[in-house]
Image: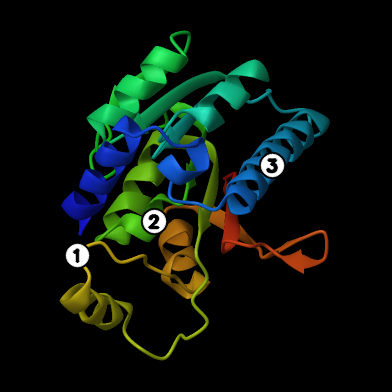
Amino acid sequence: MDDAWKAVYEMRARSNMPDHLKSCWTKEGFEELLYLTLKFVDEIDSSEIGAGNDKIQSILDVGSGPGIYCNELFLKGYDVTGVDYSQEMINLSKQRFPHIRFIVGSGYDLKFEDKSFDMSISIGALQCLMDHEKFLRELCRVTKNHIILSTLWREDTGEDPQKILRMQLVDDSWPTREYHPKEIVPILESEGFMCKIIKENGGKDIMDGYFIIARKNVI
């Protein structure tokens, strides 16, 4: 599954298509996720300053795709690093945004020290992963304070998610995974993060799933 999705992104990075299609989103869904991510970053940063804490400086984007999120965050003044497992996506990002650091790498094995970044974001990557727990724990390891995640919503909590994935893989080598928060939040909490679920934007359901905003517990 991981390799099949990687091949899809490699092909789309080389293709002449808009960024939302390179990232496998609708135009409206892509724009909403970008808008909300930037909004949440601003809100978190403002709350930190309001509480007398240091301003967020460094942000890691895991699954950075064509680099749009990284560039928008850079324009807001953050020190940004983008990581993607697609060499073609990284090549494209470096070409378009040479002022930003982009690295080819796996979310299962990030080549950074513990707590290297004030904040990490990952928008949509969970939908394409075989081992979400390994990915989440690695994200927690390299993050000092805050994590912003977006993924697709799964209503049902009664069936084994791995069984669902195995059934999907019978007919599709690159299925799109959905997650109930109970599959994600306990992992983040076990790594010392408090979580908030956000499903709505302006009173309406977010078009493409939901967000989890996680903050490291202060001991």
Say whether marks 3 and 2 touch (CB < 8 Å): no
- Tag shown at residue 35: 3
Q: Which residue is mark 2?
A: 126
Dot 3: few (<14), some (14–19), or many (≥20) neighbours within 10 Å? few
Quadrant, the N terminus: bottom left
Q: Residue at x 20, y 76 (%)?
A: 171
Q: Secondary structure at mark 1?
A: loop
Which amino acid is tagged 1? Ser
Label 1, label 2: how many angstroms apart (C-alpha)?
16 Å
**Position above or below: 140 against 70:** below
Q: Earlier in the sequence, mark 1 or mark 2?
A: 2
Q: Quadrant of residue 46?
A: top right
**Is 54 positioned to the left or the right of 190 in the image?**
right
Quadrant, the C terminus: top right
Say whether marks 1 and 2 touch (CB < 8 Å): no
Label 3, label 1: how many angstroms apart (C-alpha)?
31 Å
**Is 147 positioned to the left or the right of 108 in the image?**
right
Which amino acid is tagged 2? Leu
Q: Residue at x 67, y 65 (%)?
A: 199
Q: Nearer the viewer, residue 17 or 20?
A: 17
Q: Quadrant of residue 82?
A: top left
Can residue 112 be seen here? The reply is: no
- Residue 159, percent across and down? 36, 89
**Position above or below: 103 against 179:** above
Q: Secondary structure at mark 2?
A: helix
Q: Secondary structure at mark 3?
A: helix
Q: Earlier in the sequence, mark 3 or mark 1?
A: 3
